[in-house]
Amino acid sequence: MRRVAKLSAACIASAALALTATACGSTSSDNNNGSSTSGDGKGVKVGLAFDVGGRGDRSFNDSAARGVDKAKKEFGGDVKELTAKTSDTEADREQRLSDLADAGYNPIVGVGYAYAASMAKVAAKYPKTTFGIVDSVVNGKNVDSINFTEEQGSYLAGVSAALKTKTKHVGFIGGVDVPLIKKFEAGYVQGVKDTNPKIKVDTQYLSHGSDTSGFASPDKGKEAAQGMLDNGADVIYTAAGSSGNGAIEAVAGKKGAWAIGVDSDQYNIPGLSKYKNAILTSMVKNVDVGVYDFVKSVHDGKPLTGTNTYSLAKDGVSLSTSGGFIDDIQAKLDAAKKKIVDGSIKVKTTP
Amino acid sequence: MNKLTSRIDKERLLLGIAAPVLAVVAALVVTALVILATGKNPGPAFNDMVTYGFASDSQVFILNKATTYYLAGVAVAIGFRMNLFNIGVDGQYRLAAFVAAVLGGALTVPGWLAIPLIIVCAMATGALWAAIAGILKVTRGVSEVIATIMLNSIATAIIGYLLQPGKLGQLDEAGTLVSTKPLPSSSHFFNIDTGPAGVLDGFVVVAVVVGIAYWFVLGRTRFGFDLRTVGQSESAASASGVSVKKMIATSMIISGAVAGLIGMPTLLNESYQYDNSFPAGIGFTGIAIALLGRNNPIGIALGALLWGFLERTTNHLEFQGYDKEILGVIQGVIVLCVVIAYEVVRRYGLKRQQQKVGAELAAQAAAPTKKQEVA
């Protein structure tokens, strides 16, 4: 019995201690106030919160980083980069954004839709700081939601695949079956079918749900692409982060087959130069443009807010022409682009 | 006689505390060396960790994190006490949170009824998922380690399949995040608002209750005694009339039921929905914390708080220009040191015990030789 009493006393005491400490202690931002140097008037002070992978992923995060680098080069200033972990919870993401805001960084960019919920909370707490989020929509007076119409660019990728295939059989490989990647699939399939309804489209996702390994497994990408090639597909579009490198490698191994790259102009990526003659084109998503515009707007004193969609019309997404492999069909692609821009073709966002 | 037992208890307590303290100190030393190796000074880093970690908003953050980690630690510890390695806590809590979120989103009953229903549903799902491994073990002799690892992947696949727009998921405004239908605000668990420091999850109360129940059931009931007996020696247990198979299945189910609670602080206090950004991998954190806390209810609490503290402060270290990988280094070294330190301390304790018994025997042999002769 004595032990019960002791144990419960210990529990109550520690709980009480924790709560009083919580109520009375100063917050970390109070502690910080002395040391934070908020804006000396020169240049920009950008806080950059990356998604998992961070700078150096050769894809999505790197593209955002390019935008900020460009802004820094032009306006001078200071950039603070923080990177997400896979085990992150809402609380970690909130802390990351709050830390940046506390230290006086303005604007703050959240790269990736994972930051949506935490940014909504933090932006409300720091009304004087401007926030930007890539690939999501956050409602708030001081938030710029930077979005891209991946489905429109993918539609054009589909058109080029349909025009280039000889076997009347093409493929799509997605990294993870999340809604964002399904936008790529939806646009691509529609582009193929609108051009030639008889063409067969194989679709495959490398991983599912919360298992995000499909974005970072070149071996899985290679296997999936090889399977499609063996089935007779001869143009394969891969939207799967670094797994796409494996797919491109597999496609390059088969004569007459084409790969379509994603996010960056993969023809010009040094690591892929061995296979560049198999890369028909790349569906480029100009995250850097969106991020740069946002940082510039804050620097100019007229911060962008609301939802800014970087569509095909604004060159937010485009097909790269490096290598000149799609020069012969450029006229048809331009015609399709025109139809999307003027609204006579509506591209679906879900397959 | 009474004096003797209390002295031994004290010594055992001291030895019990020595291991985790040794481990944490060793981890700090290794971390300092790692920071030094990256060409930075570890002094300011530790200083920053302490000042930042004890700020009031950090304390709220740590308590919130520790709530989740504590439940994970207890779920794993229940298996450990029984010599069962429930690696499947990870899949159990994710599936449980998903099913509970779907139910919570669909319920239209008032909160006082909905919240218990959601919690019971989560516990039942976790228990069922763990029961598969438990039943496989007792009927077919499948190792629970293999079965639960595989069940983790299956849980991921099931959630991935069902969490799609048109099935049980819905798309957000930007069309980039798919989630279950959010819980109505009446089904939100109570929060403790501490002002500028942030909001403390009310679920911390449930975690404390679970801790007390764990201590009571394992330490003070016939069932708990049987469970620990089976864990220490199956043959001894079955010789004394305990059904080992029944105990294995039961403890797996209880472990799964507690695992079902792990996602609840996040679901009922923070996110109110299940989506792809729902925290994953906490089941594995639970293994580390149960090891660190020696399966002891208070030890696990301290381990959970330490883990929360490390995450909070190393997040901030990254901000100060240190490498964010430091967190992984500290955590990994702590777990490694804990295992080594326990073994070292156990051997030391054993040696001391042997010496003591030897000394007592020698004293006995020296003093009452006459008595023996008489007898």
Image (cartoon, coloured by chain):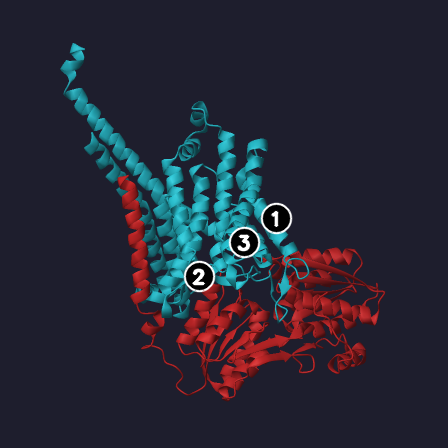
Chain colours: A red, B cyan
Q: Is residue B56 left or right of residue A298?
A: left
What amino acid is at disc 2? Answer: Glu
User: Cβ–Cβ below 8 Å for labels 2 and 3?
Assistant: no
Q: Position of residue A2 (x, y in %)?
A: 26, 40
Query: Pointer 3: what residue?
Result: B97
The answer to whether dots 2 and 1 both sit on one chain is yes
Q: Is residue A38 left or right of residue A292?
A: left
Query: Pointer 1: what residue?
Result: B154
Q: Chain of mark 2?
A: B
Q: Which mark is residue B325?
A: 2
Q: Earlier in the sequence, mark 2 or mark 1?
A: 1
What amino acid is at disc 3? Answer: Ala
- Asked if one can make out residue B40 in the rendered structure from this viewpoint, the answer is no
Q: CA distance from mark 2 to mark 1?
A: 30 Å
Which of the 4 quarters of the picture holds residue A159?
bottom right
Q: Position of residue A145 (x, y in %)?
A: 57, 77
